[in-house]
Image: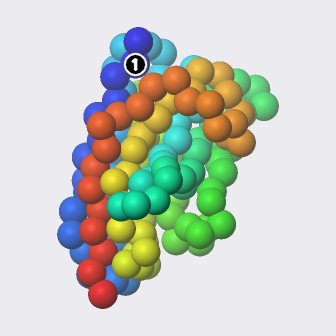
Amino acid sequence: QVQLVESGGGLVQAGGSLRLSCAASGRTFSDYTMGWFRQAPGKEREFVAASGWSGIWSAGTTNYADSVKGRFTISRDNIKNTTYLQTNSLKPEDTAVYYCAAAYRQPVYARRYDYWGQGTQVTVSS
């Protein structure tokens, strides 16, 4: 079992930045590809970014949705068991609940995630 707790959401003006964090506990963090997803009101949950687990072909890999490329950056600290999502140049359409998720030994392009956090709200005002 893996527990995930997000933090760092809030209200920001368009063009601003937020750094989201996701603290993990329960299993070997480096064995998990970590992903960020988001869900806006009335819309389906969508993939945002992923950071690969420490396997030989996966370590250091990342994947981003086209809508956030160049603006968002995912990173991870395998010592602190934490993954981060740096969000820059935020737009009103980025407003959503952002969820952290963990996938056991999956590539960054996989969409099957095993564990999910409770989410953190990001609101971008125009």
Q: Position of residue 40 (x, y in %)?
A: 39, 61
Above/below status of 102 relative to 9: above
Task: Spot the residue most to the bottom.
Answer: 126
Q: Residue furthest right?
A: 57
- Residue at numbered disc 1: 2
* Position of residue 55 in the picture relative to residue 41 (left or right): right
Q: How is the image coloured?
A: rainbow
In the depicted structure, whether residue 122 falls above or below residue 12: above
Does the image show residue 77? no
Task: Tell me the quarter of the image containing the N terminus.
Answer: top left
Image x and y of residue 6, in percent? 30, 41
Q: Is residue 87 above or below residue 83?
A: below
Q: Residue at x 21, y 69 (%)?
A: 11
Q: Position of residue 15 (x, y in %)?
A: 37, 83
Marks counted in the figure total 1
The residue lying at 42 percent from left, 54 percent from top is: 39
Query: What residue appears at the point 44 percent right and 53 percent down from the top-left corner?
Result: 38
49 on left or right of 39: right
Q: Which amino acid, by three-letter code, is at mark 1? A: Val
Q: Along the horizontal axis of the image, is 52 left or right of 14? A: right
Quarter in which the C terminus is drawn: bottom left
Q: Residues within 10 Å of mark 1 (few under 14, many from 20)?
A: some
Residue 117: quadrant of the picture: top left
Residue extending farthest left: 11
Q: What residue lies at 46% left-to-right and 35% top-to-bottom? A: 101
Q: Is residue 89 left or right of residue 125?
A: right
Find residue 10 and report its horizontal and vertical position in percent: 21, 62
The answer to whether any part of residue 61 appears in the image is: yes
Q: Secondary structure at mark 1?
A: loop
